[in-house]
Image (cartoon, helix red, strand yellow):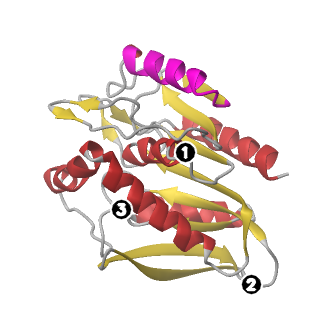
């Protein structure tokens, strides 16, 4: 049986509330590999929690972190943008919040700290890659339809320097028709990670837009469409990736 609990933690005195899920027999009984789940721009919502629950069913301890603080859930796109934009721009603060979430995961009883990965969706996909670039001690990260560039509309990020040695392997799962990632973004990512000697791979799915794993994504005008076939393929690719890394 799968069990879940909220876990509170702090960053510089600011409260954050994450969501942990693990085997109901008790996470403390046996050391298990763990996966950090990084939510999309709408905060730690039901989608992120369900992904954590699915990971727990695969035998992992999963922890869905809270990037916005105090479990804040924006109600509108405007509110989501207002919360996401400062973190998109200030990658130093973003990394601080990612690393705090990672440390919280490591402190969950039963976690094998030598076998940790991370996944993220949309903005969370960008965040998962940012965690890897920070040099965090994780085996691998997976980006589902993640943003890959440093510019989004009128937002220009202030990038942080990559770690001298990036430990994590990277898996990028991308829709060919994603309007939020340009061909230049893809080229720059591939070139940059190759130069950094990162073990990376990218899977690109045809007839697939942004947010393709989200059943609520139903906007052709915005290029946001759920694609169950690509979603299933991407999840299987993630499963294979972690099975290899945690073996």
Q: Earlier in the sequence, mark 2 or mark 3?
A: 2
The residue at the point 32 percent across, 28 percent down is 180
* Number of residues whose C-alpha sits closer than 10 Å to that of mark 2, classed few (under 14), some (14–19) or many (20 or more): few
Q: Earlier in the sequence, mark 3 or mark 1?
A: 3
Asked whether, in this view, residue 246 is left or right of residue 77, the answer is right
Query: Can you give x and y, in whole percent of width and height, for residue 32 in the image?
Result: 77, 69
Query: Can you give x and y, in whole percent of width and height, for residue 203 in the image?
Result: 60, 26
Q: Which of 3 and 184 is in front in this view?
A: 184
Residue that mark 2 sits on: 28
Residue that mark 1 sits on: 132
Asked whether, in this view, residue 91 is left or right of residue 239, the answer is left
For the residues labelled 2 and 3, the Cα–Cα distance comes to 26 Å
Q: Main secondary structure of the magenta part?
A: helix
Residue 88, quarter of picture = top left
Q: Which range is magenta?
A: 184-199
Q: Please say whether residue 189 is one of the residues in the magenta stretch.
A: yes
Query: Can you give x and y, in whole percent of width and height, for residue 64 in the image?
Result: 49, 65
Q: In this view, does 217 lie above or below 18?
A: above
Count of numbered tags: 3
Q: Do the residues labelled 3 and 1 touch (CB within 8 Å)?
A: no
Asked whether, in this view, residue 169 is left or right of residue 207, the answer is right
Asked whether, in this view, residue 37 is left or right of residue 87, the answer is right
Query: Is residue 141 visible to the viewer in this orientation of the structure?
Result: yes
* Number of residues whose C-alpha sits closer than 10 Å to that of mark 3, classed few (under 14), some (14–19) or many (20 or more): many
Q: Please say whether residue 80 is one of the residues in the magenta stretch.
A: no
Mark 2 falls on what kind of element?
A: loop
């Amino acid at each position: 049986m799968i069990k879940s609990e909220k876990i509170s933690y702090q960053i510089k005195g600011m409260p954050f509330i994450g969501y942990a899920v693990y085997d109901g027999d008790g996470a403390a009984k046996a050391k298990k590999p763990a996966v950090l789940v990084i939510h999309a721009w709408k905060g730690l919502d039901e989608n992120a929690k369900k992904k954590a629950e699915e990971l727990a069913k695969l035998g992992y301890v999963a922890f869905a972190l809270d990037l916005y603080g105090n479990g804040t859930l924006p109600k509108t796109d405007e509110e989501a943008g207002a919360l996401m934009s400062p973190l998109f721009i200030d990658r130093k603060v973003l990394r601080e919040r990612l690393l705090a979430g990672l440390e919280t995961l490591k402190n969950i009883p039963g976690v094998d700290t030598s076998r940790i990965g991370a996944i993220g969706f949309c903005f969370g996909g960008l965040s998962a890659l940012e965690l890897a670039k920070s040099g965090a001690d994780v085996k691998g990260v997976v980006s589902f339809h993640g943003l890959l560039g440093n510019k989004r509309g009128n937002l220009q990020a202030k990038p942080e320097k990559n770690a001298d040695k990036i430990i994590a392997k990277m898996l990028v799962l991308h829709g060919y028709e994603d309007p939020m990632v340009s061909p230049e973004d893809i080229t720059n990512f591939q070139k940059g990670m190759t130069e950094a000697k990162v073990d990376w791979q990218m899977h690109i799915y045809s007839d697939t837009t942004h947010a393709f794993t989200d059943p609520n994504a139903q906007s052709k005008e915005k290029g946001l469409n759920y694609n169950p076939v690509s979603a299933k393929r991407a999840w299987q690719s993630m499963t294979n990736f972690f099975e290899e890394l945690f073996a």
